Amino acid sequence: MSCDEMNYGHGCYRYGTFAFLGRGMDKNVPQSTVYYERACDLGFLKACHNTGVAYMQGDG
């Protein structure tokens, strides 16, 4: 996967979204937050927003 192997922010964001929605895997909101945070750290700004929302909702 591009996130784990290549530290690609957009890949981390997409994986977080799949985990959040349960696409291709079981829904896992805590895992999605981890990947959103990683994507944010890699400079993908949409993920920073999603990380903040997750923490505000108690999912972080």
Image (tube, rainbow, N blue to C red):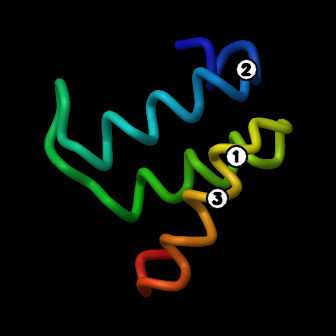
Q: CA distance from mark 1 to mark 3?
A: 12 Å
Pointers 2 and 1 in contact (C-beta within 8 Å): no
Provide the secondary structure element on which disc 3 rests.
helix
Residue holding disc 2: 8
Residue holding disc 3: 49
Q: Is residue 43 left or right of residue 36?
A: right
Question: How packed is label 2: few (under 14 Cα within 10 Å), some, or many (20 or more)?
Answer: some
Question: How packed is label 1: few (under 14 Cα within 10 Å), some, or many (20 or more)?
Answer: many
Q: Amino acid at mark 2?
A: Tyr
First in sequence: mark 2 vs mark 1: 2
Q: Is residue 33 above or below residue 47?
A: below
Residue depicted at 55% across the width and 79% down the height: 55
Q: Residue 11: x, y in percent?
A: 58, 21
Q: Nearer the viewer, residue 30 or 43?
A: 43
Residue holding disc 1: 38
Which corner quadrant of the image does residue 29 belong to?
bottom left
First in sequence: mark 3 vs mark 2: 2
Q: Residue 56: x, y in percent?
A: 52, 85
Q: Amino acid at mark 3?
A: His
Q: Is residue 43 left or right of residue 12?
A: right
Which corner quadrant of the image does residue 18 belong to?
top left
Q: Residue 1: x, y in percent?
A: 52, 13
Q: Which mark lies nearer to you, 3 or 2?
A: 3
Q: Which mark lies nearer to you, 1 or 3?
A: 3
Provide the secondary structure element on which disc 2 rests.
loop
